[in-house]
């Protein structure tokens, strides 16, 4: 398990340092994590294969021969025939092959990243529990029991989302975006520059949303701790609550903290619901300009009809991975806020054991001296 740094507090650490410490829990599973990366890479390449296949079909219907003249054409023509016969055989085979690659990539990526995720949750919970067992009494005097329970349950789930789920989307959709943009530059670098120009605007939106996500995430964690604390107090002291007629007081108290948690959660939803459409709108504007320019013969150059369609389709498909990449920012900010809270617990000084006396023989007798009661 990861060791705590020498720093006594985590509040002074940057997001990059906190995230680096969080990812250190993934290091023991680097090989499994690498297999998931390979799976997501296969998934991204297969998506690009579907785009290329669309252009291939359109060129074939238009009388073009995309395969002819390539290095593999002699072998393919020997196996599947020439001209229309080659296209009729090759296109269905490509559809099935690309679908199989995509399915294999999805299976590998999701399965192996889940192994990392579940182990991360287990290790963090065990380390939190072990730490709680050796912390001094004054720590429990300063912290409500509900907040400590929330660290083991709610906070760990948030951290796991940032360390694995967010990384999963980042790798899968990041590879997809890189593949699409690279293919756009390959088809027509002049038109591809349009998407690069939109990048800084998207960055501004994401940066603003990040700060707001962080603030709200910290409030949600605190409110969730309050909910757990109030509920555990009422259940543990149910006899006292009923004896002294405190049911209505506890009911109002729980409704207050639960409603606060609901309000903070709604703020998170509103922020995400605004940021994501703005990013989509920027991509749509770039796409509209792209289509307008694509109709200019001087910019299309020697591109075939299939290549033009490939360019437009690849540009349109960029909207989905970019949207998902912008959405993981919410998950990362939640995880970083929870990670800071958990690492603060890990860095708490443990109970010192300075005892020197060893008792050899115990008689088992109890004696009271100078004890009074009033």
Image (cartoon, rainbow, N blue to C red):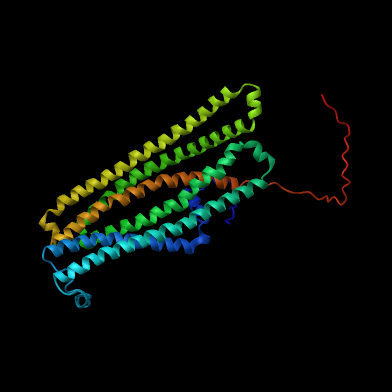
Q: Quadrant of the C terminus?
A: top right
Callout count: 0
| 124 to the left or right of 291 | right
- Nearest the viewer among 164 and 298 is 164
Q: Position of residue 280 (x, y in %)?
A: 28, 45
**Quadrant in the rendering for residue 251:** top right
User: In the rendered view, does 79 fall on the left or right side of 174?
Assistant: left
Percent across and percent down for residue 330 are 41, 44
Position in image of residue 207 (x %, y %): 37, 44
Residue at 28%, 60% in the rendered image = 48
Residue 350, how many percent across, how many down? Answer: 67, 47
126 w.r.t. 71: above or below: above
Kindly tell me whether residue 12 is visible in this rendering: no
Residue appearing at x 44%, y 45% in the figure: 333
Q: Residue at x 41, y 34 (%)?
A: 266
Up-down relation of residue 119 to residue 365 (above or below): below
Looking at the rendering, in which quadrant would you find the N terminus?
Answer: bottom right
Q: Residue at x 14, y 60 (%)?
A: 305
Using the image as rendered, state which of residue 294 and residue 86 is in the foreground. 86
Q: Is residue 61 visible?
A: yes
């Amino acid at each position: 398990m990861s060791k705590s740094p020498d720093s006594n507090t985590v509040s002074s650490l940057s997001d990059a340092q906190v995230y680096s410490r969080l990812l250190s829990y993934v290091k023991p599973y680097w090989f499994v994590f690498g297999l998931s990366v390979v799976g997501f890479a296969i998934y991204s390449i297969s998506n690009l294969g579907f785009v290329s296949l669309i252009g291939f079909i359109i060129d074939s219907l238009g009388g073009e021969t995309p395969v002819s003249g390539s290095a593999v054409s002699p072998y393919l023509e020997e196996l599947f025939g020439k001209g229309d016969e080659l296209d009729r055989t090759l296109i269905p085979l490509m559809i099935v092959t690309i679908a199989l690659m995509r399915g294999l990539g999805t299976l590998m990526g999701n399965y192996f990243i889940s192994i990392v995720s579940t182990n991360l949750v287990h290790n963090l919970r065990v380390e939190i529990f072990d730490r709680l067992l050796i912390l001094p009494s004054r720590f429990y005097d300063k912290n409500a029991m509900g907040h400590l329970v929330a660290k083991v349950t709610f906070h760990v789930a948030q951290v796991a989302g940032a360390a694995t789920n967010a990384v999963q989307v980042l790798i899968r959709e990041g590879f997809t975006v890189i593949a699409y943009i690279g293919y756009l530059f390959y088809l027509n670098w002049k038109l591809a520059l349009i998407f690069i120009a939109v990048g800084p605007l998207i960055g501004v939106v994401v940066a603003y949303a990040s700060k707001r996500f962080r603030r709200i995430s910290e409030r949600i964690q605190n409110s969730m701790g309050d909910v757990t604390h109030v509920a555990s107090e009422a259940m543990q002291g149910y006899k006292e609550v009923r004896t002294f007629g405190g049911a209505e007081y506890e009911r109002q108290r729980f409704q207050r903290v639960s409603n606060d948690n609901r309000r903070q959660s709604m703020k998170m939803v509103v922020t995400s619901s605004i940021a994501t459409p703005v990013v989509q709108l920027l991509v749509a504007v770039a796409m509209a300009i792209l289509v307008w320019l694509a109709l200019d013969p001087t910019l299309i150059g020697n591109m075939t009809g299939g290549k033009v369609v490939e360019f437009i389709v690849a540009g349109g498909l960029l909207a989905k991975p970019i949207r998902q990449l912008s959405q993981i920012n919410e998950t990362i900010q939640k995880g970083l806020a929870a990670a800071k809270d958990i690492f603060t617990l890990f860095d708490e000084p443990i109970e010192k054991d300075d005892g020197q006396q060893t008792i050899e023989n115990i008689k088992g007798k109890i004696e009271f001296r100078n004890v009074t009661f009033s």
